[in-house]
Image (cartoon, rainbow, N blue to C red):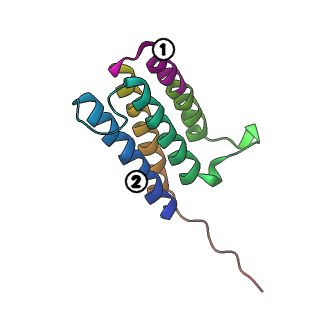
Amino acid sequence: MIASSRDVLATVLVGGSAALTWAHVNGLDWPFVGSARTTAGLVFVLGIGACAGGSTESWESDAARKRWYHRAGAALSVVAVGALVWALVTGSTVAVVALASVIGVKWLLATVRHLVTPAPAASAVA
């Protein structure tokens, strides 16, 4: 298992984005959730924070070493940016929910991968 405190940070940030989305959808009187555009921006920033804080070792510049989860994460990132643009242009609550859903799926994939991936063997130091 390669899960770490970074996964806890990512979980908190994704939970915050889910809470903001839930508050916006239900019309709660929370700061910054009255507008779909503002909520989408905040959800996106929290998602960026979760990705940046939760996965410093996932960047792989060598295309031959990229795994399926690198490609899936990149594709979901493109979908998240598309949902953000959709939300900013139209002010649609559906776009905010789509954005939060994509962020949640990215978090779920990364967290499950971290939980099931065996830790690397400790190198022998002589």
Question: In this view of the protein, which residue sits in the foreground, 80 or 118?
Answer: 80
Residue 100: quadrant of the picture: top left
| Residue 20 vertical placement versus 10 (above, below) | above
Question: In this view of the protein, which residue sits in the foreground, 45 or 4?
Answer: 45
Residue 35 can be seen in this image: yes
The majority secondary structure of the magenta stretch comes to: helix
- Is 122 one of the magenta-colored residues? no
Q: Disc 2 and disc 1: Cα gap in Å?
A: 28 Å
The answer to whether residue 87 is left or right of residue 29 is: right
The answer to whether residue 125 is left or right of residue 31 is: right
Query: What amino acid is found at the position of numbered circle 1 in the picture?
Result: Val
Asked which secondary structure carries label 2, the reply is helix
Asked which secondary structure carries label 1, the reply is helix
Could you say which disc has been placed on residue 26 in the image? none
Label 2 or label 1, whichever lies nearer to me, is 1
Residue located beneath label 2 in the image? 12
| Residue 103 vertical placement versus 75 (above, below) | below
Where residue 7 appears, x then y in whole percent? 47, 57
Where residue 80 appears, x then y in whole percent? 50, 28
Where residue 32 appears, x then y in whole percent? 37, 35
Classify the position of the C terminus by image quarter.
bottom right
Where residue 23 appears, x then y in whole percent? 27, 36
Residue located beneath label 1 in the image? 89
Residue 1 can be seen in this image: no
Q: Residue at x 36, y 25 (%)?
A: 35
Q: Earlier in the sequence, mark 2 or mark 1?
A: 2
- Is 90 one of the magenta-colored residues? yes
Residue extending farthest top: 90
Query: What amino acid is found at the position of numbered circle 2 in the picture?
Result: Val
* Magenta stretch, residue numbers: 81-93
